[in-house]
Amino acid sequence: MRFLILLLVIFNFFNLKNSFIYPRNNSQPLFYRFNNFSQKSSAKLIYKDGILNIEGLNGNANVSVYTIIGNKVAVFYNIELSKFKQNINLEKETMYILRIELSNKILTYKFFAR
């Protein structure tokens, strides 16, 4: 009886097509749905002459700018992204992180101030 249970457990783990980890109706494993990092966005960040411009996103969002070590530089609450054009004084040749909090997702971008 123990041997039969051991065979069933081993068969379940090594036969991946019938395993409970793989969903029945989807070709991807279950853990791919939880770790889906393919947040592709067509957003374009432009920082020129002290003005930060975001193109390619629509809707209202909270926009935050951080230094690469996490210090908050600027915050804009409930901004319409299609019209986003803000004057921000950033240090030249420094990397910054832009965080956009939409109603259903959060997007982060790295950019250089040049």
Image (spheres, grey):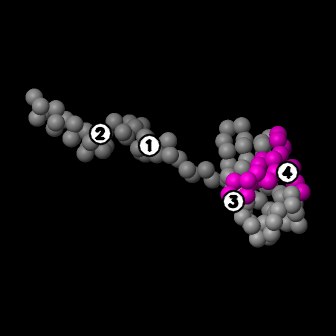
Give the secondary structure at mark 3: loop
- Work out whether mark 1 precedes mark 3 in sequence or the reverse, and give the earlier one: 1
The magenta-colored residue range is 63-87
* Callout 1 secondary element: helix
Between 78 and 65, the residue placed more toward the observer is: 65
Residue 43 visible somewhere in the drawing: no
- Res 34 visible: yes
Disc 2 to disc 1, how far (Cα)? 15 Å
Q: Earlier in the sequence, mark 2 or mark 3?
A: 2
Label 4 secondary element: loop
Instruction: Look at 79% across and 53% down and name the residue there.
Output: 73
Please identify the quadrant where the N terminus is shown: top left
- Do residues under tags 4 and 1 come within 8 Å of each other at their CB atoms? no
Pointer 3 residue: 68
Q: Amino acid at mark 2?
A: Asn
In the displayed structure, 72 sits above or below 23; it is below
In the foreground, 84 or 56: 84
Residue beneath disc 1: 31
Judge by depth and name the residue closer to the eye, 95 or 59.
95
Front of the two marks 2 and 1: 1
Q: Is residue 18 left or right of residue 41?
A: left
Instruction: Report the residue marked by disc 4.
Output: 84
Q: Nearer the viewer, mark 1 or mark 3?
A: 3
- Quick check: is 71 in the magenta stretch? yes
Badge nearest the viewer, 2 or 4: 4
Going from the N terminus, do you reach mark 2 or mark 1 first? 2
Would you place residue 105 above or below residue 5 in this image? below
Q: CA distance from mark 2 to mark 4?
A: 50 Å
Residue 21 location, quadrant: top left
**Which label sits on residue 18?**
2
Report how far apart the C-alphas of labels 3 and 4 lie in the structure. 22 Å
Above-or-below relation of 6 to 84: above
